[in-house]
Amino acid sequence: FYRAGGLAAVRPLYHPDLLPLHGAVPSTRTERRSGLAEEVLTDAGFRGGVDVLVVFSNSGVNPYPVELARTARAAGSSVIAITSPAASADAPKRAGTTLAEEADIVLDTLVPGGDASYPPTAPVTAPLSSLANAFLWNTLLVELFDLAETEGLELPLWRSSNTVGGDEANAANL
């Protein structure tokens, strides 16, 4: 989210234990923990009905992404899911439903169940979801930019801090 050209109005909502930097198993365990989404939204000061929530989850079946979407919608916010309904179809529904079913807008990554893509006959490596997520997010930013320009609005966008005037421009977005 904090990249040159990124939308400055974005605030990431996560719990440190969700990050795989502390290990894949603890990260997975945390994403499957019911109740964490409401805690994270509350701690972040999420403003239902005002904030739009964008949730990224390849399979979209674990409690954390599903409960994020469900809680935000119940609070009156719109939810955009960047997910793979095909991957959801192949995965156990640990939250009873899927992120795609809880969202207002679904951007389909088209990633197959299991995420891996190589070798084609029996995929075990080369996951696609990270690439698809980045592509869809950047496509969404392009659409937002064009819509804002049509409406005569200026989006708060980050500039590269390594360009002349970048630091000053970014300071205006804080």
Image: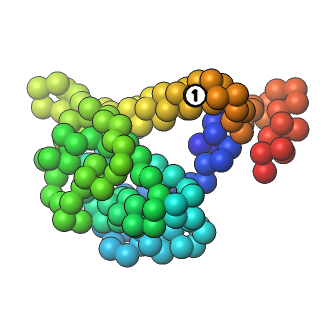
Label 1: which secondary element: helix
Viewer can see residue 4:
no
Residue under pointer 1? 147
Query: Would you place residue 94 above or below residue 89 in this image?
Result: below
Q: Is residue 146 left or right of residue 73?
A: right
The answer to whether 143 is drawn above or below residue 129 in the figure is above
- Residue 139 appears at what percent x and percent y? 48, 27
What kind of colouring is applied to the model shown? rainbow
Type of the residue with mark 1: Leu
Q: How many marks?
A: 1
Q: Position of residue 136 (x, y in %)?
A: 43, 32
Q: Nearer the viewer, residue 83 or 162?
A: 83
Identify the image quadrant of residue 8: top right
Seen at 88% across and 38% down, the residue is: 168
With 3 as the anchor, is 29 left or right in this view?
left
Q: Residue drawn 48% across and 75% down?
A: 39
Task: Tell which of 51 and 36 is nearer to you.
Answer: 51
Q: Position of residue 45 (x, y in %)?
A: 60, 69
| Residue drawn at the location 15% of the way across and 58% of the way down | 92
Q: Check the image and report above or below for 10 versus 155.
A: below
Q: Position of residue 100 (x, y in %)?
A: 28, 49
Residue drawn 57% across and 58% down?
50
The residue sitting at the front extreme is 151
Is residue 42 among what the camera can see?
A: yes
Q: Please tell me in which quadrant of the rendered image residue 146 appears.
A: top right
Residue count near mark 1 (Cα–Cα under 10 Å), binned few <14, some 14–19, many ≥20: some
State the image quarter where residue 124 is shown: top left
Q: Quadrant of the N terminus?
A: top right
